Image (tube, rainbow, N blue to C red):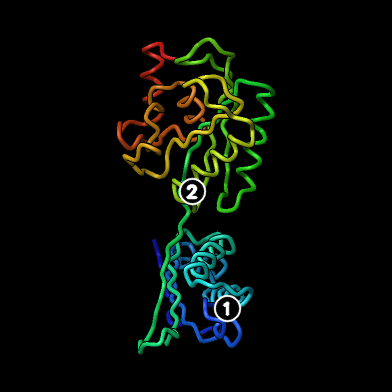
Amino acid sequence: MDTIHISNLIIYAHHGVAKEEQTLGQRFQLDAVIFLDAREAAAGDDISLTVNYGEVCRFLKAEMEKQNDRLIETVCGRMAEALLIRFPLIRRVSLEVKKPWAPIGLPLDCVSVSTERAWHKAYIGAGSNLGDREAYLRSAREALSSASGIRSLKAAPVLETEPVGYTDQPDFLNTVYEIETWHSPAGLLKILQKLEDEAGRTRAVHWGPRTLDLDLLLYDDLVTEDPDLILPHPYMHRRKFVLEPLCQLNPWGVHPLCRKRFRDLLEDLECEGEK
């Protein structure tokens, strides 16, 4: 990964909790580290294949000045996310917003807040077995495609499968979505749960019928122990209705814990006769 460093970009803006900060304004200094793949640009000496740091500086200035925020945490996070949207070649950005001589009634040189945002690859399992199943999956796909902080959605072909676990219910339509997102796993989970709620999802029966089921399967190679969000999904390697569409998108991907390719995991299940 290559980097572009921008140091002490000076911008006059109106951010802060104090009234005088909002009305009179003050000087801010910005540092940015941009992560990208610049090999093709370097080989061809072609600025169109990299990120123009002059354009980045002008964009940061405009973004800094377009609204007044109370917290520099808000400023920093908002601008880092805006950079990822504006410049598609940026894979990750580290941004620090400095406030020199912050008005706290004590002598100090500077207060600063830094943040990092990056595009992460995630896989989402989607299923429905109540109502208009096709419409629920289509609506979920459209909502994810248009959600802030999500891009490059790819969808596997939809397949019809028999229920697993609680079997006294209608057959499912299942698919898997591949996305890039800057949201954290917890933030992405909230988006998925909101879409389920909007589809009228109820959770009366474990593994029971549902209008829409959205499971976060994988988030990069992250492994978590949080009981509210276990990654990778604890059952995905034993579910044919997950692995089959997943292999349509990424057959050579490797499960972070099993250390086996998705294609090989699917073949293992088929040999065992699993659903």
Q: Secondary structure at mark 2?
A: helix
Which residue is tagged 2? 187
The one of 91 and 71 positioned closer to us in this rendering? 71
Query: Which label is found at residue 237?
Result: none
Q: Secondary structure at mark 1?
A: helix
How far from the left and from the top, in percent, is residue 264? 37, 25
Quadrant location of the N terminus in the rendered image = bottom left
How far from the left and from the top, in percent, is residue 82? 56, 64
The one of 153 and 37 positioned closer to us in this rendering? 153
Dot 2, crowdedness within 10 Å: few (<14), some or many (≥20)? few
Residue at image position (36%, 44%) is 222
- What amino acid does circle 2 point to? Gly
How far from the left and from the top, in percent, is residue 243? 45, 26
In the image, residue 16 sits, relative to residue 241, either above or below, namely below
Q: Is residue 158 left or right of residue 239?
A: right
Q: Quadrant of residue 46?
A: bottom right
- What amino acid does circle 1 point to? Lys
Q: Quadrant of residue 68?
A: bottom right
In the image, residue 181 sits, relative to residue 173, either above or below, namely below
Q: CA distance from mark 1 to mark 2?
A: 28 Å
In the image, residue 164 sits, relative to residue 25, either above or below, namely above
Which residue is tagged 1? 61
How far from the left and from the top, in percent, is residue 130? 63, 21
Q: Quadrant of residue 171?
A: top right
Dot 1, crowdedness within 10 Å: few (<14), some or many (≥20)? some
Nearer to us of marks 1 and 2 is: 2
